[in-house]
Amino acid sequence: MGLERVAQSFLRYVAFSVFCIVVNPSASKAQTVDVSGSYQCTQAKVQGKVLACSAAPLILKNDGRFELRGWEGSYLVDGEWVTLSDSLTKARAKIVPGHKIVLRFYGKKGWSEMTYERRVAEMGKTSLG
């Protein structure tokens, strides 16, 4: 008798879990963010000093590839992070509100931080850029 009761409770629990997943599918899988587009460098921070940025744009393509100053490879979005990588190098950039991506790296002058902002379409134009 006791085993039968446990089995019924377990089946109710399984049925309820399946129902919750069917009703709310986002609870069972991660949401992907579309970050593809062209990002213009708006700010650079080198050795703690904020500078105007004139670096080449960061281009994230729809197929999971990227381009940055001749560096080409693939990117992967994981939550609030974008991982840029090629066969030798890997870098992680943070996605911040306002269509921005912040890339931190260690260069010749120590830690640097580049802020890239997504270009938006202007009124009357049909493409980004």
Image (cartoon, rainbow, N blue to C red):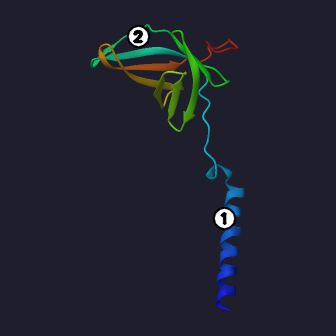
| Quadrant housing the C terminus | top right
Task: Name the quadrant containing residue 24.
Answer: bottom right
Q: Position of residue 25 (x, y in %)?
A: 68, 51
Measured in 3D between alpha carbons, the distance from the residue under mark 1 to the one under mark 2, in whole angstroms, is 51 Å
Q: Give the mark count.
A: 2
Closest to the observer: 90 or 100? Answer: 90
What residue is drawn where x is 41% and y is 10%? Answer: 53
Query: Which residue position is annotated with label 1?
Result: 17
Look at label 2 and name its amino acid.
Cys
In the rendered structure, the answer to whether residue 43 lies left or right of residue 65 reads left
Look at label 1 and name its amino acid.
Ser
Please tell me whether residue 21 is drawn above or below residue 77 in the rendered image: below
Q: Residue furthest left?
A: 48
Query: Which residue position is annotated with label 2?
Result: 53
Badge 2 marks a residue whose secondary structure is loop
Label 2 packing within 10 angstroms: few (<14), some (14-19), many (20+)? some
Q: Position of residue 114 (x, y in %)?
A: 41, 19
What residue is drawn where x is 72% and y is 57%? Answer: 22
What residue is drawn where x is 68% and y is 12%? Answer: 124
Q: Residue furthest bottom?
A: 1
In the rendered structure, the answer to whether residue 43 lies left or right of residue 21 reads left
